[in-house]
Image: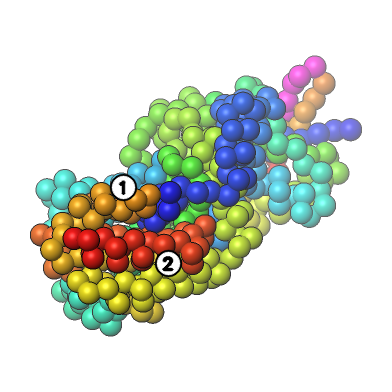
Amino acid sequence: MVYYLIVCRSLTYAQRGVRLLERAGISAYLVRAPRLIAQAGCAYCVKVSSRWLERALQLLRGEHLNPRGVYQQLEHGEYEEVEV
Amino acid sequence: MIYLDSAATTMEKPPTVARATAWAMTHMASPGRGGHRAGMRAADTLFELRDTAAQLFDVPSPDRVVLTYNATHAINLAIHALVRPGDTVLISGYEHNAVTRPLCARKDITLRVAQAPVFDQAGMLEAFRRELERGVDVVICTHVSNVFGFILPIEELAQLCREKGVPLLVDASQSAGGLPVSLSGWGAAYVAMPGHKGLYGPQGTGLLLCGEELPAPLLYGGTGSESKNQAMPQVLPDRLEAGTQNVAGAAGLLAGLRFVRQKGIARIGAYEHCLCSRMMDALEEIEGVRVFRGNEAQSGVCSITVEGMDCEEVGSWLACHGVGVRAGLHCAPLAHQTAGTLDTGTVRLSFSVFNTTQQVHTVAGLIRQMVRCH
């Protein structure tokens, strides 16, 4: 399964995001952002599977929870930013 | 002890509050500072608190609920964000020192006061209208006087402020949990409230509900976010929450909010008003006792004076007989000045949902005995 990490502006934004997606029936997890993608340092992400990415982003933007960035989780602990 | 000092802090709390606070102290770490279970548990609790408060007080989103250490802290944050050098700030004649002291410390502003007799809602609104016509940059008003329980016409005032485009800060210290409080409905810039009074949380908790503006921070420090950035984050609540939060207090406050939600704000307010009315009915029968009474314009708080007795003497006598009230100026000299009691002070009796009619009868009987013996 391919997972994506949606980096949020704050912990509270990430918490709002997870709850929003869960209410929409999307499995989403709140995780701490790995250092490589945390940008300004110390951040939280919403983790979703590839199946839900597009819908998740749509819902988040609809609530003005615009992400700082979206990254695909690769093997060996690497991440690749994706254009969305 | 019969405790009638809930306007200062509600001492009796729902049992869930102490349980939640104690549990948090041993099971919750610092929120937003790690991804481990104890940290995330704390973060979840804080989010639930913000979310519950947002629902209770009509805040558009939970991130606009800032956790503070008390209402004074919340008011200071809001004043710092709202009031700029050269501003004219309009307040009611019933403000607490939590409002007047931070404003008096600002030498670069003009302070004006809207005055009306106690319990005169129409007069108060007219006074605000008159002052607003003269040009005002910020309005700060208490929802309920902490001394007299006078309910100020906050909805109408909020409408006036919206019409004039003047930002409004509401001090809901005496109303949150007992009267409807609505950030969105009022269109207020900020609403400040303590967690430890009508919301039944532990002392050391408070909330600042924030409107649409992004406020300037008062404190600077770590937020667990954007750590490389030396400026405070541009998002709420992080921008106003530097340093580790009072997590145990927040857990207790969440339990308190759930209690209030379950009981119902209208029901709580009506019950306290009813107890207060019964007390005033009984005290008005006693010769030499002056009761400050406002009927529908009054919450579950009342003030009295006793002829020939100093208010502190009354407070001490009642304390010796197992009754907790508050005598003096109640940190609100402006309110006493407005009502003409600055020189005497008053004795304040304030109620919570845990008081009973039996307690009202007992205390009224004691005051009758005190007056007779004096």
Q: Position of residue B243 (x, y in %)?
A: 44, 30
Q: Which residue: 34% across, 51% down? A: B321
* Position of A28 relative to B328 (above/below): above
Give, as a single range, the part of the protein colored magenta.
Answer: A76-80
Q: Position of residue B360 (x, y in %)?
A: 42, 65
Residue picked out by circle 1:
B320
Q: Quadrant of residue A12?
A: top right
* Magenta-drawn stretch contains B9: no
Q: Position of residue B156 (x, y in %)?
A: 36, 77
Q: Check disc 1 and report its element: helix, strand or loop.
A: helix
Please tell me how crowded label 2 is: few (under 14), some (14-19), or many (20+) other residues with Cα within 10 Å.
some
Q: Is residue B29 visible?
A: yes
Residue found at the far top of this picture: A76
Q: Which mark is on residue B262? A: none
Left or right of residue B256, residue B98 in this image: left
Q: Position of residue B128 (x, y in %)?
A: 23, 74
Mark sitting earlier along the chain (2/1): 1
Residue picked out by circle 2:
B361
Are the residues under badges 2 and 1 in a single subunit?
yes
Name the amino acid type tagged 1.
Answer: Cys
Q: Quadrant of residue B46?
A: top right
Numbered label tally: 2
* Position of B249 relative to A25 (above/below): above
Q: Which residue: 25% across, 49% down? A: B316
* Position of B142 relative to A75 (above/below): below
Left or right of residue B57, residue B293 in this image: left
Measure the C-alpha gap from mark 2 to mark 1.
Answer: 18 Å
